[in-house]
Image: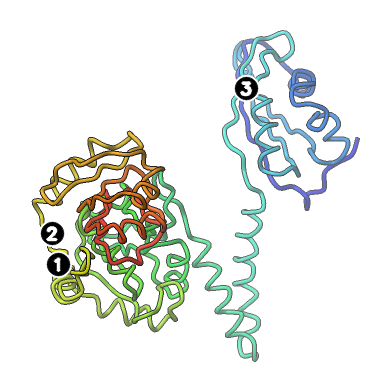
Amino acid sequence: MAKISPVSIKYMIHASFRVEGALEKPDVIGAIFGQTEGLLGADLEMRELQKEGKIGRIEVELERKDKITTGKIKIPTALDQSETTLIAAAVETIEKIGPCDSQIEVERIEDVRGSKRDYIIERAKKLMGELKGTTDSREISKEIKDSARTAGVKEYGEEKLPHGDISGDEVIVVEGRADVLNLMRAGVSNVIAMNGTKLPEAVKALSQEKEITLFIDGDRGGKLIAQNVMENARIKYIAVAPDGKEVEELAGKEILMCLRKKVPAEDFFSSRLGSRISETKTGNSTASSSFLNEKNRIIIKEIARKNEGTGKAVLLNDFLEEMKNVPAKSLASFLKKTRSSPSVIILDGTATKSTIEFAEDAGVRVLAAKNFTTTDTSLELMSF
């Protein structure tokens, strides 16, 4: 029977079991091979996989106490992620081990390569000391430091938001994972990403207990994101990348400089957005976007809440009275054909680029949606 090379191992399935009765290791291994036979088809037959070296030697540890036998099972695989999870699920279907009723539970699937990467980084740090004073030592040092910093990226909450060390009282919120990585390379680890333009619930909750700095791109889209986030969370400071630059492309010194120049959120809006607030189209004339005052925001949010889950778009007039509702997927084509000019559209879903463009052409003043594929528009965008 072929053995799997330790170098080829990708994943390790860790499982446990408990049975009433006395067992031996061969009973457990026999049950694994015998009771999974034929479950997943010929391509994932465990006996054949082991002969081909795709599944390694199965390790079993037993412990007997009175009439109870408990144990741990380890199954190394060189399969891909989906195939490994199928094997793990198949093992959980085993109902008997030897003569005893049993239940096997997979506790976790370990990515063995992740442990190897951690070892490589730690070992490289030690080896770096031997290269000090050589021409390349600074470059090697920087590369290792960058790897060590970015290897610390984790996922936060159900929305799996990329983040660094956010255990402290101050947290920096950025738009995407690339921004998180860039800040961590610069030594700024207290950072978390929104994974898009919409404010996640997890970040909204963080803002109630931590001091939040929002770090945005230096373009109009960044300012619109700031506006949307401020509507739904408690933001203390706002930092902005230089004009025309994105956070993910800033050098380390630029990142630190931008963070030093952060301003209180209320000052940012009064000095920047107050003078920038766009004008929207109404025929050949323009109208100030001051339409989105606090009272109107509350009304729009309430209508959006009632519309959530319907898959529809609600069209409102200047008095925020409903003119019509249409299926969200038909909104763009409806706006293209309609002669009416709604002031506000509330969309249950994501506003695509084409929808935003048709809304502009139709003279819409405010577009409220769960998310936006682009923020490059003269409309006022409102997320909920």
The correct choice, above or below, for 110 with respect to 249 in the image is above
Gap between marks 2 and 1 measured at Cα: 7 Å
Whether residues under marks 2 and 1 lie with C-beta atoms below 8 angstroms apart, the answer is yes
Q: Earlier in the sequence, mark 1 or mark 3?
A: 3
- What residue is disc 1 on? 288
Q: Tell me which amino acid carries mark 2.
A: Phe
- Disc 2 marks which residue? 291
Question: Where, quadrant-wise, is the N terminus in this rendering?
Answer: top right
Foreground residue, 249 or 281?
281
User: Residue farthest to the top?
Assistant: 99
| On screen, residue 27 above or below 301 | above
The amino acid marked with disc number 3 is Ile
Pick whichever, 8 or 182, lies toward us: 182
Residue shown at the point (10%, 54%) measured from the top left: 294
Q: Name the kind of residue labelled 1 in the image.
A: Ser
Write down the residue under mark 3.
104
* Helix, strand or loop status at disc 3: strand
Q: Nearer the viewer, mark 3 or mark 2?
A: 2
| Residue 230 lies in quadrant | bottom left
Residue depicted at x 23% and y 42%: 304
Inter-mark Cα distance, 3 to 2: 61 Å
Judged from the image, the secondary structure of the residue bearing numbered disc 1 is strand
Give the structural element (helix, strand or loop) at label 2: helix
| Label 3 Cα neighbours within 10 Å, binned few <14 / some 14-19 / many ≥20 | many
**C-beta proximity under 8 Å, tags 1 and 3:** no
Position of residue 355 relative to residue 52, above or below, is below
Query: Which label was assigned to residue 276?
Result: none
Left or right, residue 90 beside residue 278: right
Residue 202 placed where, x, y %? 32, 48
In primary-sequence order, the first of circles 3 and 2 is: 3
Query: x, y percentage for residue 142?
Result: 55, 79
Residue at 41 percent across and 46 percent down: it is: 159
